[in-house]
Image: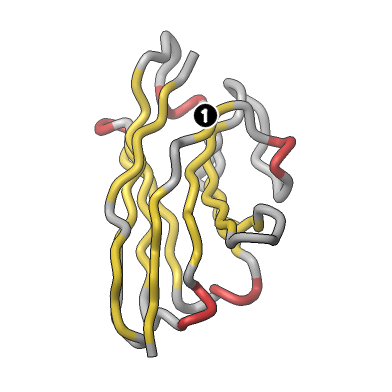
Amino acid sequence: QVQLVESGGGSVLAGDSLRLSCTATGSGRTFSAYGMGWFRQVLGKEREFVAAISWVESEKYYVDSVKGRFTISRDNAKNTIYLQMNILKPEDTAVYYCAATKPLEVVGLEVADYAYWGQGTQVTVSS
C-alpha cells in the first residue's frame, strides 16, 4: 500500500508559476521502483494525463498542451515527485492528482495504468 500526499496548489494569475509536490509513504519497496504520473480533472470532464516519469532512467512524458511549460521530476531520496508549472494559462485550471504504478510497472497515459492516487490539489489560474 502506497499513500500519496499532494501539496502546492493555489490561485495564481496567468503567466505565473506553481510547483506541485507529492510525497509517498507506507511502501515496503524503494520509491525508485514506482513509476509516477500527474493527471488533472475539471468538473464535467474525464481525468486527463499531464505528465509521467518512469522508474527506469527517469524517462519523462508530457501531454502536448504542457510541453515546454511543465516539468516533472523526482527525488527518490525524499520519496517525492514534483510538477513545475510555468507560464500558467486559465485552461490549466483543474484539480491535479499524482499517481503511482505498481512496483516496476511501466508508466502510461491512462488512469487504469496507475494503482495509487493522491487526494488532489486545486490549481486556479485567472486572467
Residue found farthest to the top = 28
Residue at the (42%, 9%) spot, across then down: 28
Q: Nearer the viewer, residue 57 or 70?
A: 70
Q: Where is residue 83 in the image (x, y as percent from the top left)?
A: 39, 57
- Name which residue lies at 33% across and 34% down: 23
Q: Percent x, y for residue 38?
A: 52, 50
| Position of residue 92 measured from the top left corner of the image (x, y, whole percent) | 50, 73
What residue is rendered at 74% in x and 36% in y?
112
Which residue, as the protein is rendered here, is positioned at the far front? 44
Residue 116 falls in image quadrant: top right
Q: Give the labeled residue for mark 1.
A: 34
From this view, report whether residue 24 is shown above or below residue 119.
above
68 in relation to 99, above or below: below
Q: Quadrant of the C terminus?
A: bottom left
Left/right of residue 81 with respect to residue 115 in the rendered view: left
Q: Depth check: 95 or 4 in front?
A: 95
- Residue 26 location (% of width, % of height): 37, 14
Q: Is residue 7 toward the left or the right of residue 48 in the image? A: left
For image coordinates 68% across by 61% down, the residue present is 44
Q: How is the image coloured?
A: secondary structure
